[in-house]
Structure formats: structure tokens, C-alpha cells
Image (cartoon, rainbow, N blue to C red):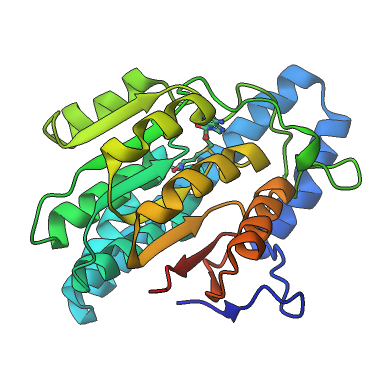
């Protein structure tokens, strides 16, 4: 599924965009420089929506192929990815990675809840929840933390050389917005999860996560997707000890957001964690919590 790295500075994980990402990195700044701002926004949205539409159609083909030659998990992964792409900011690799690790947690009977900190419109949260519903033997509580007001401002810890990360577009306060109403509609109305199975916790992680740590209890899959230093550090410090040995921690922004990487590297050093990091193929990483 991915390359393995250790945090010894030798195998430093870097963000390596694919062909489309590399092309977008040239085209988008060019359009921003040359078009009036209103036209630029319309053009950007049209290109982004066109890309997402094309990608969704490609998943029809993948699903058809999986139907003929794939396993039950291949079929499920492709159909869920296609269904959830419109709700995802991380795209297909983030969705597929969330599927793989939740499926692994189910296969290995790792005890605990499913937790995401940084939900936006709910794409990866829904992937984790649906994968567990389809493949799990038991019903797991799902906890989805977000301000539901978009991103906070980055702090000084997020900056390296005047930049906060490797983005095509800047991420100002309020970016990546998904409201609690939108995510509630997805979880409860569209996907029909019972209200007592999925808890949406609204507020800044700094306020909500420490308060909910004991209520959440044991965790099988912890997905951190808050972009910034504080937004990675707070859930990691509060929830790491809740993660079951053999459970999975995913950090979506490790190679794309400088502060997220810093929070993880500092945490590994402080706690002397030796677990190898695996890449998700687009800048995110994951690791299995060691037993000791
Ligand atoms: C990149 S988006 C998450 C993408 C999402 N996982 C998906 O599947 O598309 C980052 C989210 O983290 C949330 N966030 C970041 N820092 C936060 C904080 N300190 N407290 C609460 N929410 C935060 C933002 O509101 C935003 O919804």
C-alpha cells in the first residue's frame, strides 16, 4: 500500500504531487496572476469540478473491473470512493487509505471507536464509518470532531521560510468549511447512521478534545486532518494513549503542512515512538501503534 519510513531524518517524507498535481501547480498560479479575481474564481471552480467529475467517472470503470476480477473489498473500496469523492477534500488517495486502514482494523479485530479530527464536509469520516459498517462484526462508536466553521489561523509554529505548506491555493481562516448541518445530513439522512452511533463534536479541538478524551475511550482508528500544528498536536497528545495497540493513526497533512509534520515529529521524539511511518501516496502518513 505504501512506502515505509523512519523518523531518523534519512528517509524524510516529502510531498510528491502526481502529474495532475504538478500541472495544477503551474496552471493555477498562472490563472491567478493573469485573470481578474471573479473570473479566476469561476475558472478555478470549473476546473476543479471538472477534475472531480472525470475522476468519479473513472471509478465507474474501476468498479466494473473490480466486479469482474476483484475481491469483495476491491468492489467495496471502489464503490465507496466513487460515492464519497464529492464530499472529500483529500481526494481518492485519502479515501482509499481510510478504507484500507479501517478494513485492516476490522480484519484484525482491533478494539475501539473510530475517530476523525478534521471532518470538513465528511468524506473521509463517512468512508471510515461505512467501511466499518460493511466489514465489521460489531457496531463501533464514531466520533467526528471539527469546528464546523472551517480552519483557524495558523500559528507561528506552522511557518517555514514564510510558508505554511505546499498548497496550490492559500488556506485562510474559515477555509475547508463543512457545516455541522451538512455533515449531519450526510451521516444521518443520506447514509442512515443511527444518531446514537455517530457523534459530531463541534468546537475547537483545544476546547473539545481534552473534555471528550475519557468519554471516547479506546480507539481503533484515529484520523488527524486538521492541517495545522496545534490542530495536529492537541488530538495526538490527548488521544494517542486511547489508541489500542495495533490500532492505526493517520496524519493526513504530514508532508503538505509544515506544522503538522512538526507536531508529529516532536511527539515521536518526546514519547520515543519508533513506529515506521507509511505514506498514503499524496503527502499523508499512517502508523500502527506499537504494543509497548
Ligand atoms: C482539510 S479539512 C478536513 C478534510 C476532510 N477530512 C475530508 O475528508 O475532506 C480540515 C478541517 O479541520 C478543521 N479544523 C482544523 N483545525 C481545527 C481546530 N483546531 N479545531 C476544530 N476544527 C479544526 C477545519 O474546520 C476543517 O474542516
Which quadrant of the view contains residue 69?
A: bottom left
Residue 74 image position (x, y, % from top left): 26, 71
Q: Residue at x 22, y 73 (%)?
A: 108
Where is the N terminus found, in terms of image quarters? Answer: bottom left
Q: Residue at x 76, y 74 (%)?
A: 9
Q: Is residue 55 above or below residue 226?
A: below
Closer to the camera in the image, 50 or 181: 181
Q: Is residue 95 above or below residue 275?
A: above
Which quadrant of the view contains residue 248?
A: bottom left
Q: Is residue 234 above or below residue 54?
A: above
Q: Residue at x 74, y 27 (%)?
A: 40
Residue 83 can be seen, yes or no: no
Going by the image, does 211 lie left or right of 283? left
Going by the image, does 258 lie left or right of 232? right
Residue 154 image position (x, y, % from top left): 72, 32
Closer to the camera in the image, 120 or 77: 120
Residue 290 can be seen, yes or no: yes
Which quadrant of the view contains residue 291?
A: bottom left
Amino acid at each position: 500500500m505504501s512506502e515505509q519510513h523512519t523518523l531518523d531524518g534519512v528517509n524524510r517524507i516529502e510531498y510528491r504531487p502526481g502529474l495532475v498535481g504538478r500541472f495544477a501547480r503551474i496552471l493555477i498560479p498562472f490563472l491567478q496572476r493573469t485573470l481578474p479575481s471573479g473570473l479566476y474564481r469561476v475558472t478555478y471552480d470549473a476546473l476543479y469540478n471538472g477534475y472531480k467529475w472525470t475522476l468519479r467517472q473513472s471509478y465507474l470503470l474501476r468498479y466494473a473491473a473490480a466486479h469482474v476480477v476483484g475481491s469483495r473489498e476491491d468492489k467495496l473500496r471502489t464503490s465507496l470512493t466513487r460515492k464519497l469523492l464529492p464530499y472529500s477534500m483529500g481526494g481518492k488517495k485519502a479515501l482509499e487509505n481510510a478504507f484500507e486502514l479501517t478494513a485492516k482494523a476490522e480484519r484484525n479485530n482491533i478494539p475501539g471507536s473510530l475517530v476523525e479530527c478534521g471532518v470538513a464536509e465528511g468524506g473521509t469520516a463517512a468512508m471510515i464509518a461505512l467501511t466499518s459498517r460493511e466489514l465489521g462484526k460489531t457496531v463501533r462508536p464514531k466520533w467526528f470532531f471539527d469546528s464546523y466553521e472551517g480552519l483557524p489561523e495558523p500559528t507561528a509554529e506552522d511557518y517555514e521560510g514564510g510558508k505554511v505548506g505546499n498548497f496550490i491555493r492559500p488556506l485562510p481562516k474559515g477555509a475547508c468549511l463543512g457545516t455541522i448541518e451538512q455533515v449531519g445530513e450526510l451521516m444521518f439522512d443520506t447514509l442512515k447512521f443511527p444518531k446514537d452511533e455517530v457523534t459530531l463534536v463541534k468546537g475547537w479541538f483545544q476546547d473539545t478534545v481534552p473534555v471528550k478524551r475519557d468519554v471516547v475511550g479506546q480507539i481503533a482508528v484515529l484520523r488527524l486532518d486538521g492541517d495545522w500544528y496545534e490542530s495536529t498536536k492537541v488530538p495526538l497528545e490527548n488521544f494517542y494513549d486511547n489508541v489500542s495497540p495495533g490500532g492505526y493513526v493517520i496524519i493526513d497533512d504530514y508532508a503538505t503542512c509544515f506544522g503538522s509534520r512538526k507536531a508529529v515529529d516532536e511527539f515521536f521524539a518526546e514519547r520515543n515512538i519508533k513506529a515506521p511511518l507509511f505514506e498514503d501516496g499524496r503527502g499523508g502518513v499512517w502508523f500502527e501503534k506499537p504494543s509497548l
